[in-house]
Amino acid sequence: MPEDAELIAGMIRGESGAFAELYQKFRARLHQYALSLIRSQVEAEDVVHDVFVGLAKQASGGRMPRELSAYLYVSIRNRCVDRMRRKRELALDDVDLDLIVAPPGDEDRIELRRMLNRALLELPAEQAEVIVLRTWHDLEFAAIAGIQGTSINTALSRYQYGLSKLKKELEVHGR
Amino acid sequence: MEDDRIERLLKGYRLPEVSRDLDHRILSEGAAIMAPAHARATMEEVGWSLLHGLGFGYVAWLLDLVTTTDAEYRVEFI
């Protein structure tokens, strides 16, 4: 897969193929990230849509961010935070979405999926955010701290607190 | 349960699917937005090749030099 810099150059030349590759590279991660923040399938899709369409507009004007990955994550976060300010918070019972999907045939994970999913959604938002970014997006704590606008130590302790709550939840269920 | 065990357990899960409808919406809108930039870039390319073909390669080289070299600005306080 081409590097981000190549895709950025391609997008500035207006190549829709470069845009499609870039979208393909980030779509699943940014979609999960938006879901974990805004907790609504429809709104998460709208946010991802707006961020990529905004990126296409920038490219067509000959401008692109230097740190593409950081830019995309921060854009998703800002848009989610902005929407969350305007809507009432849903009770967890009203939230029906999957942040994680078990691989087919993996009985152990299939069995735990619903419980882990719920436990993730019950975590304080900042802790769930760090766990998502660290576990499934492989981001360094420095990058996560940059996205959250906090220190590396804070990001690290949010991760540890979140993980220990998930651990307790698993232990309650005899794991 | 150890920390690395729960980390391994979590990592084994996949990300949720992205809907085909969203893919289609984003890719078609993105392509439409970038179409003028693509036309512009193609025209530029044709223009450069034409200059080279007509033996004015040095003009193209000169323009390239001017447009890709960063200008330097300096403010002097007296």
Image (cartoon, helix red, strand yellow):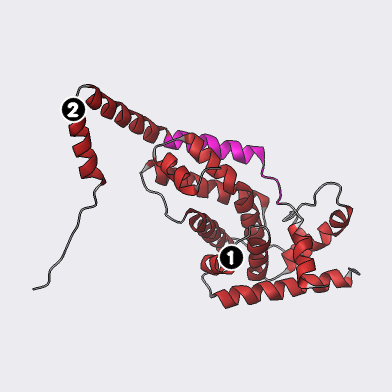
- The amino acid pointed to by label 2 is Phe
Quadrant containing the N terminus of chain B in the rendered view: bottom right
Q: How many marks?
A: 2
- Residue A64 in sight from this viewpoint: yes
Height in image: B7 above or below B17? below
Helix, strand or loop status at disc 2? loop
Height in image: A123 above or below A43? below
Q: Residue at x 38, y 33 (%)?
A: B36
Q: Main secondary structure of the magenta part?
A: helix
Circle 1 residues within 10 Å: few <14, some 14–19, many ≥20: some
Quadrant containing the C terminus of chain B in the rendered view: bottom left
Height in image: B5 above or below A6? below
Q: Residue at x 63, y 52 (%)?
A: A29
- Horizontal and vertical percent for residue A69? 52, 55
- The residue identified by callout 2 is B56
- Horizontal and vertical percent for residue A62? 36, 44
- The residue identified by callout 1 is A140
Helix, strand or loop status at disc 1? loop
Circle 2 residues within 10 Å: few <14, some 14–19, many ≥20: few
Residue A49 included in the magenta stretch of the image? no
Task: Quote the CA–CA distance across marks 2 and 1.
Answer: 51 Å
Height in image: A94 above or below B41? below
